[in-house]
Image (cartoon, helix red, strand yellow):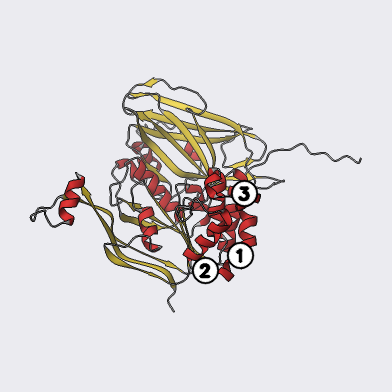
Amino acid sequence: MSEYAIKVDNVSKLYKLYDKPSDRFKEALGLSKGKKLYKEHYALSELSFNIKKGECVGIIGTNGAGKSTILKIITGVLNPTSGTVDIEGRISALLELGAGFNQEYTGIENIYLNGSMIGFTKSEIDAKLDDILKFADIGDFVHQPVKTYSSGMFVRLAFAVAINIDPEILIVDEALSVGDVFFQNKCYKKFEEFKEQGKTILFVSHDLGSIAKYCDRAVLLNKGRKMDEGKPSDMIDLYKKLLVNQVDDEGNELSAMSENLFDETSDINSLESTFGLDNSGNGLWRDSFEINPNVNPYGDGSAEIIDFAVIDEKGNFTTSLEKGKKFKIKSKVKFNKDLEDPIFTYTFKNIQGTAITGTNTMYEDVSTGGVKEGDIYVATFEQVMNLQGGEYLLSISCTGYSDGDFQAYNRLYDLLNITVISDKNTVGFYDMFSKTSIEKC
């Protein structure tokens, strides 16, 4: 018995794109006279990856990267043009919810129809019926034709049917955000149950926080090819660079800003030279901080973050902050070209790589205005620390828009480790600081 639940080996999917419907018709009848009347488009090209039993693997990538195509091939909805896919275990797929539903049938009739399409017998569906109805929670509407359902009721029933079987492999394509917030919470709890039971999960989502939270590994696709695979946090950072054109199609860095400016072996003089500073002896704010040796810097170089600081309510430079106390984040940026209204940002992530909170000057409606080459600006963010006690990663950046397109001028991801000190934690990521009282009636 193999250790792998899913093996994708050198899979390609070719589509023929015709300029005119008549060209497709001519080729079908053999009337093309040896001429190729179509353009070739590879939705997938020589894609390979394996998923071990019990693993949760995420697939990320831009629109058109081939994410949904590979899921459809794995589930048998599509056939590959070349290559093979081996599956060991029964699959439940959450792809196009309700795709197999008959609009004229009632909800109950569609449960049996959809269940039989998945491969269940009537007796197996009978045993699951109560769980499906309880999860969908659409009441007596289950006895009405689904054509009378609201869109929310429709997806609730479709999700309930797909999730409430006992698969060995669960495949999810952007399906955990259906329905209202309460139903979404129920979906995520079910997803967590599958993880706890050691099910194999293949998960596609644009929600990078969910990829970071749930997945053991991530596969990054770009233009139908596998760019890379590895730790979710690493793949998410590479994906963000891809979005702002800081890596080529193979994942290679395109900008000089992508060099590790904070190499542990660098001395202060070389760092000052890198940041365009003199050696006046006045010191830098960041001299007081231990910088993450694996900080992830990149950008197009239009601006450079030349200094930064985290300051507690007593005015101390520190990475240890007390919950409930005020603190500041400072970011000093030198501009290397004229820019219009650049944006200063910061983000806190947990150690799993999930973005917890953050803001920027655009959100806060603080305009920088036009800046000139050589200008230096300092952005100061002052706030109260409401995060729970624990360890976090702070990222800062300077970004903006040029001719309507978003640009990353300089980003320093996972720059500092911030420790939040707390003598009282509550549920979740942050504290609501509730004023709580109890009275005897």
User: Are the residues at dot 3 and dot 1 in contact (C-beta closer than 8 Å)?
Assistant: no
**108 sits left or right of 6 in the view:** right
Could you tell me which secondary element the residue under label 3 belongs to? helix
Q: Residue 141's mark?
A: 3
In this view, 284 is above or below 42? above
Task: Give percent across and percent down for residue 142.
Answer: 61, 52
Amino acid under label 1? Lys
**Mark 3 or 1, which is nearer the eye?**
3
N-terminal of the pair, mark 3 or mark 2, is 2
Could you tell me which secondary element the residue under label 2 belongs to? loop
Name the residue at the right extreme.
441
User: Are the residues at dot 1 and dot 2 in contact (C-beta closer than 8 Å)?
Assistant: yes
N-terminal of the pair, mark 3 or mark 1, is 1
Task: Give percent across and percent down for residue 147.
Answer: 52, 46
In this view, 262 is above or below 218? above
The residue indicated by pointer 1 is 128
**246 sits left or right of 117 in the view:** left
**Mark 3 or 2, which is nearer the eye?**
3
Q: Is residue 116 visible?
A: yes
Could you tell me which secondary element the residue under label 1 belongs to? helix
The residue located at (63%, 60%) in the rendering is 131
Q: Quadrant of the N terminus?
A: bottom left
The residue located at (17%, 48%) in the rendering is 23
The residue indicated by pointer 2 is 120
User: Are the residues at dot 3 and dot 2 in contact (C-beta closer than 8 Å)?
Assistant: no
Task: Give percent across and percent down for residue 207.
Answer: 48, 47
